[in-house]
Structures are given as C-alpha cells and as structure tokens.
Amino acid sequence: MKTEKVDVLVIGAGPAGTVAASIVNQAGFKVKIVEKLQFPRFVIGESLLPRCMEALTEAGFVEAVKKQGFQEKFGAKFVKEGKTCDYFFADQFTPGWNWTWQVPRGQFDKTLADTVSQMGVPIDYQTTVTGISFQGTDSVTTVEDAAGNLSRIEARFIIDGSGYGRVIPRLFQLDRPSSLPPRKALFTHTVDLRRSLSDEPNRITIVVHKKGVWIWIIPFSSGITSLGFVSEPGFFEDFSGTPEEQLRAMIATEPYLKERFDQVEMVFEPRVLQSWSSTTDRFYGDGFVLTGNVTEFLDPVFSSGVTLAAVSSQLAAHLVIRTLNGEQVDWAAEYTEKMMQGVDTFRSYINSWYDGTLDTIFFADNQDPLIKSQICSVLAGYVWDLENPYVKNHSTALEKLASLIQLRDRQQKPNPIHK
C-alpha cells in the first residue's frame, strides 16, 4: 500500500481546512489536504461576518476572493410586522473589519481551495478517511480514493476541518448531543428579478415570521438570492405537497416576501436541512485538533458558521506550528477555552433570538447608540472582545436589557381614562 509522509494532514477543504493549511504551510511545514467530495459542491452558510476577514487575510485569500466579484455585505437587517432594525458594521463597537461578503459557498470554497493549492498544498478530492491510528502525536491515516484504492498518510499532526463529516469525532466516538433543540430549514436559490422592490442588496435580511420561525434573504451579486425558512420541525407540518409547493405556500403567508418572491423561479428544488446542531466531547487530543463545525455547529441565524470555522482554524494553526516546533502548548486554555468564549456568546444570542428576548431589543424605540454598537459587534462576529459588556456578560446582559426596555415602555404608556 502506498504511504506518504507529511508534517500536517488536514481533513476537509472547506474554509476551516484551507485557512489552517495555508497558515501552517506558510510556516514552512509540509501540508496535505484530503477532501471527501469534489469541488465545487453545495453547502449553506452563505452570509459571512467581518471577523472572518482577519483569518482570510492571514491565510492569503482576500485578493483571490475579491476577484470573484461577490456581493459585498455591510450589515444586517431585521424585519418584524412592518418594523425594521438595521445594524451597520461601520457602527460596531469593536475595532476591526466593517464589511465582508455574501457568497454562493460552492464558488467561495472552491476559490479558497484553488488558492491554497496554488500555494503548494496538494488537495486529494473524492478521498475518504477510513481509519486513523495514533502513536503518541504521530498518526497513520488510511484513505480511499474514488477508484477504491487505499493508501496511507503518515503525519506528525492532524487538523480535522471536515465540517458535517465530523471525521475524528465519529471515528473515536467523541460526539455528544447539542444543548440546542432540533430545528429544520427549507430553502432554495431564486432568480430575484424583483430585487428592485427591496432595499439595497448589500446586507442579509432576517424576517421574523412568528415566534420561533424566521426567514433568511441573502442576495448574491449574480442576481440570485438565497431564501429559506427556519423553525422547529412542527411548523412545516402545516404545509403539504412537494418541497416547492410547501415553500411557495410559506412565501404566500409572509407579507414581506409575497410581492417580491411570488411565483419566483427557483434555481433548484427546495432542500431540507435539519437537526444540524452538534458538539463534541473535546476539541483536541494527542496529535489532533478539531476546527470549525467539527467542534460545534450552533444555528444559522447569526451566520456564525464560517466565522467560527475560520477563527478556530486560524488559532489552531498557530498552536500546531508551536507544537511542531517543540513548544509546550496548553490546548485547554489556549484553544478550547478561547473557542468556547465565542461559541457560548453566539449560543446566548441564539437562545435569546428564539425566546423573543432579541425581538424586544431589536425592535425597541429610541435605542441607545452605544448599546446598539456593542450588540452590532457581536453580529459582526467579534465575540472574543471582552471589553464589550455584551460579550463579557453575554449570559445575562441581553435579558437585563430587554427587561429594562419593557419597564421603560410600561412607564411611558399613557394611563387609561376611566369614565
């Protein structure tokens, strides 16, 4: 059986894998990527956050992505029952990037993969990991190509950025249930000929359909718009027929969508994604580290997926480099605790979104500009800025703010006239 030796084996050629591979490669180590699928391939997670731009910059990807002409994104718009709340990244509290992109992920991910390949990192597509054995921090990984041929890759370290594939967690039984309830999405891409009826396309729009049910609208520069409904599975049981018939019926029930998307052409039959939330027993071990969705995938509502993938890979890559250079690394403190700060902050906002707390905050009158800028920083992905009280105190700050808004509004409400 053919055997190849590398310093670092990266599993997965998505944003997590390519960011890590590029940074480790730049440090002078021999890196190889194996990817189960052939690119381009479809995946959701199409609206990026400004924080991921820092990782894309260090990986050397920004110029290549700019050349693709993707839709620039400058903020997020929330809509509920005729009320609108805008967050513009230029107003955020935390210094950093104030824009990013909205991207068809097949094209975006292939751009990153092609770029890292041009940097000298080989990628074996249609290659499946069938087994991994560790001898201390060294490993031997068995892979199978599209023709069924088996080969081995010896590595000093493995970075698992396999996303939903969750290679190492599944091989070593590290998966555990998420604390978030199961949810479902029905989505498609549309030919958005009526985009002129909407606001400018350079932001994502999130529509609150009813409590616990929301809609994403993500315009691309091509004139295609990604559209999806998200809820607990029970919501979808009220709609019958084919996936297209179900989605068209849902569109007809939402006034904000009806005129723009009524009878719109769908690029593909609407697809279902459900029960996506997942986590793992640990983020690292002797000779391996998990990055991106392999660690924990939460929910699509605040577009955290690519940001957590890119930032975790950026951080992990530097720790792997230090490890390979013989330094002692405290993986618990320097990786797991760091990443959980971001994950837990996003989790607090996701829970507050579904329980209605953020409705109270987003659609409040006379919002405090400083507080809004601090929340905007979270929506931009700056969930590691402990100078921001809405990051540092994420588990309590939102509920306290919503309670203060409700109290203020009650006090300002005129007393009824009694006759």
Image: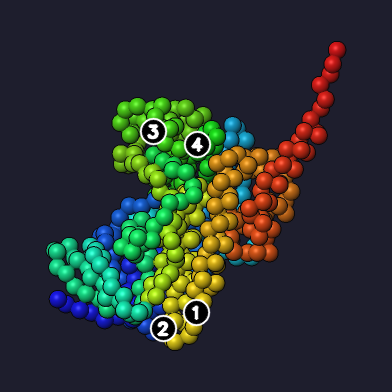
Density class for disc 1 (Cα within 10 Å; few <14, some 14-19, many ≥20) is few
Residue 197, given in percent of the width and then of the height, sits at: 50, 36
* Nearer-N-terminus badge (1/3): 3
Tell me the residue that label 2 is attached to. Answer: 324
Which mark is first along the chain, 4 or 1? 4
- Name the residue that disc number 3 marks: 247
Nearest to viewer (mark 1 / mark 4): 1
Label 1 with label 3: CB-CB less than 8 Å? no
Type of residue at label 3?
Leu
Q: Residue furthest bottom?
A: 326
Q: Is there a contact, CB below 8 Å, between mark 1 and mark 4?
A: no
Quickly name the residue at label 4. Answer: 213
- Residue kind at label 1, given as amino acid type: Val
- Residue 108 lies, in percent from the top left, at 38, 59
Evaluate if marks 3 and 2 touch, with contact meaning CB atoms under 8 Å apart.
no
Which residue shows up at 35% across the image and 27% down it?
Answer: 240
Q: Nearer the viewer, mark 2 or mark 4?
A: 2
Q: Is residue 14 visible?
A: no
Which comes before the other along the chain, label 1 or label 2? 2
Mark 3 or 2, nearer chain start: 3
